[in-house]
Amino acid sequence: MKLRRFNRGLLGLAGLVLLLGGGAVLAAGLDLAVPSWWPWSGPDDVLLTRAQRQRWRDEGWWWPTVIAVLGIVVLLALAWLVAQFRRGRLAEVLVDTGDGEDAVVRGSALEHVVAADVATLEGVAKPRVSLRGKRTAPTARVLLLLEPYAAPRDALTALTDEALRHARTSTGLPSIPTEARLRAVKHHARRVT
């Protein structure tokens, strides 16, 4: 979710910069009335003059600075690219079958089973479960939407004593560290007549 927000923010910022830059060049190119502080004054004006392009060429610090800045841009782009392929959720969980072999359970299947167990609890609506971490030591994040009449303590107790215990037993894991978040379902006030 955070990566998706970051991507949208980055694309929005890049789009805004391109739109403003393109608008400035277009306004000058169409010979529109532009303010005196505008960087380009008309269609015959160039974006960068020859003097501006060659201004720092003879300085000793110029090329190392350019190369360092471009290197940082490349490293940031590579880090962003790697982050795109990193999975947020656990794809599979490794289960020790006890006979020396291992079995694999899809992470989404285990998430669905835990969510189904929690959904049977009274007062819990639309539970969301996501598994993260390693295949041999998964961690869980659980979001419980509680109805107005639900008791949070009972929901947490049932989550740990029933749903997560079933998941630990079925996968043979000694523990599944869990972060549970509780939220109330939005509801309308009742009318009293």
Image (cartoon, rainbow, N blue to C red):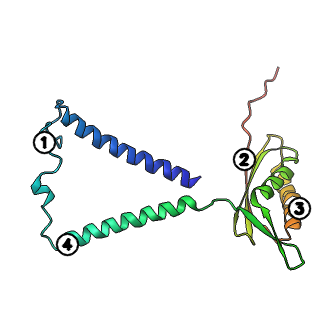
Q: On the image, numbered disc 1 is attached to which residue?
A: 45
Q: Position of residue 136 (x, y in %)?
A: 75, 72
Packing grade of label 2 (10 A; few <14, some 14-19, many >=20) is: few
Q: On the image, numbered disc 2 is attached to which residue?
A: 183
Identify the amino acid type marked 3: His
**How far apart are the two marked residues, 3 and 4, measured between alpha carbons?**
64 Å
Label 1 element class? loop
Identify the amino acid type marked 2: Arg
Identify the disc placed on residue 166: 3
Dot placed on the residue nearer the N-terminal end, 3 or 4: 4
Q: On the image, numbered disc 4 is attached to which residue?
A: 61
Quadrant of image for the C terminus: top right
In the picture, residue 16 is in which quadrant? Answer: top left
The nearer-to-camera label among 1 and 3 is 1
Which residue corresponds to the image point at 18% horizontal and 30% vertical from the top-left? 32
Dot placed on the residue nearer the N-terminal end, 2 or 4: 4
